[in-house]
Amino acid sequence: MKIVFRIVLGFVLLAAAITAYSYGQTTGMFLFILAGFALETVFWFNLFPVRRKAPH
């Protein structure tokens, strides 16, 4: 179930980033471009999570 949630969350984040980029381009509002960048960053960190090593 956890892997399915991560995949769905990834697609939702990517779709939201593309939508924000698109809306920012058509309206000229830089805020939506920044929001798209932030959503894309969260998408990539969700796709490749940071793995921490356990101390010995």
Image (cartoon, rainbow, N blue to C red):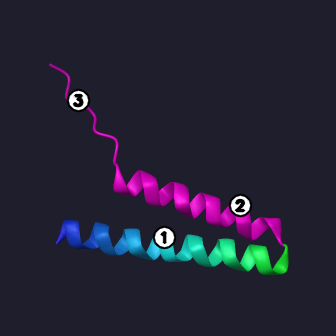
**Element type at marker 1?**
helix
The secondary structure making up most of the magenta span is: helix
Which structural element holds mark 3?
loop
Instruction: Answer above or below: position of 50 versus 42.
Output: above
Label 1, residues with CA under 10 Å away: few <14, some 14-19, many ≥20: some
Rendered view: 54 above or below 10: above
Check the image and name the residue furthest to the right: 28
Tell me what residue is drawn at x 57 percent, y 70 percent. 17
Q: Residues within 10 Å of mark 2 (few under 14, many from 20)?
A: some
* Image quarter in which the N terminus is found: bottom left
Q: What residue is at 19 percent from the left and 29 percent from the top?
A: 54
Is 44 displayed left or right of 3 in the figure? right
Q: Looking at the picture, which amino acid does disc 2 mark?
A: Leu
For the residues marked 1 and 3, what is the alpha-carbon distance in whole angstroms?
Answer: 29 Å
Proximity of marks 2 and 1: CB atoms separated by less than 8 Å: no
Relative horizontal placement of residue 22, taking residue 43 as reference (left or right):
right
**Disc 3 residue type (three-letter):** Lys
Say if mark 3 contacts mark 2, CB within 8 Å.
no
What residue lies at 67% left-to-right and 71% top-to-bottom? Answer: 21
Tell me if 7 is positioned left or right of 28 in this view: left
Q: Nearer the viewer's eye, disc 3 or disc 2?
A: 2
Nearer to us: label 1 or label 3: 1
Residue 23 in the image, given as x and y percentages of width and height: 72, 79
Query: Which residue in the structure is indicated by mark 2?
Result: 34
Residue receiving disc 1: 14
Give the CA distance from mark 3 to mark 2. Answer: 33 Å
Task: Report which quarter residue 29 is drawn in.
Answer: bottom right
The residue that label 3 is drawn on is 53
The stretch of residues the image draws in magenta is 29-56
Of the 4 image quadrants, the one containing the C terminus is: top left
